[in-house]
Image (spheres, rainbow, N blue to C red):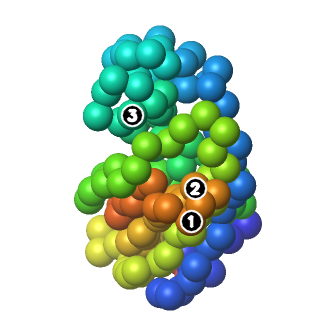
């Protein structure tokens, strides 16, 4: 189990690959973001995105899955107090293969909860062509070994 102290500033955590399918794009959109560019190829072709594309919120979910698989499930993560920003940079399409990286930008102990540390992270994903599709910065809370 990786603790707060196991993620010093500058740590880089590779993620992926994650294969995106048409079916998952449409199923997510039907349930959570039923806009035409996420549901129908014809309507999507006429949209600003120029073709069927995953909802940005779906891409956030894909990114979260990749983070869990890469490091969260093997850590003492206690969740996140919030997200500073999410930027959707390019459409995610059926057939894309996503990879990415999370970088530790800052690490500090909690003043009010000495058994918790906060990591400030930046995560980005890219498609198989090397084009970045999303980036985000946020904090996570982990148990500290020192206070355990």
Residue carrying label 1: 130
Residue 22, percent from left and from top: 62, 26
The answer to whether residue 37 is visible is no
Q: Is residue 66 above or below residue 112?
A: above
- Report the residue at 64% width, 21% height from top: 23
Give residue 134's quadrant in the image. Answer: bottom left
Give residue 15's quadrant in the image. Answer: bottom right
Q: CA distance from mark 1 to mark 3?
A: 19 Å
Mark drawn on residue 30: none
Residue 102, percent from left and from top: 53, 69
Give residue 100's quadrant in the image. Answer: bottom right
Mark drawn on residue 50: 3
Q: CA distance from mark 3 to mark 2?
A: 17 Å
Do the residues under discs 1 and 2 have CB atoms within 8 angstroms? yes
Mark drawn on residue 127: 2
- Report the residue at 27% width, 56% height from top: 85
Q: Which of these two is toward me, 80 or 24? A: 24
Going from N to C along the chain, the mark reached first, 3 or 2, is 3
Going from N to C along the chain, the mark reached first, 1 or 3, is 3
Callout 2: few (<14), some (14-19), or many (20+) C-alpha neighbours within 10 Å? many
Callout 3: few (<14), some (14-19), or many (20+) C-alpha neighbours within 10 Å? some
Residue 136, percent from left and from top: 37, 59
């Amino acid at each position: 189990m990786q603790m707060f102290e196991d993620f010093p500033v500058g740590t880089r955590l590779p993620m992926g690959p994650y294969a995106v399918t048409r079916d998952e794009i449409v199923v997510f959109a039907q349930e959570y973001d039923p806009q035409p560019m996420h549901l129908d190829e014809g309507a999507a072709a006429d949209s600003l995105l120029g073709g069927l594309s995953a909802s940005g919120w779906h891409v956030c979910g894909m990114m979260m899955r990749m983070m869990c698989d890469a490091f969260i499930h093997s850590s003492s993560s206690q969740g996140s107090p919030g997200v500073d920003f999410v930027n959707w940079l390019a459409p995610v399409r059926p057939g894309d293969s996503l990879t990415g990286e999370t970088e530790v930008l800052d690490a500090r102990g909690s003043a009010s909860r000495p058994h918790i540390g906060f990591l400030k992270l930046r995560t980005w994903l890219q498609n198989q062509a090397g084009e970045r599709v999303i980036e985000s910065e946020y904090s996570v809370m982990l148990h500290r070994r020192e206070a355990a």
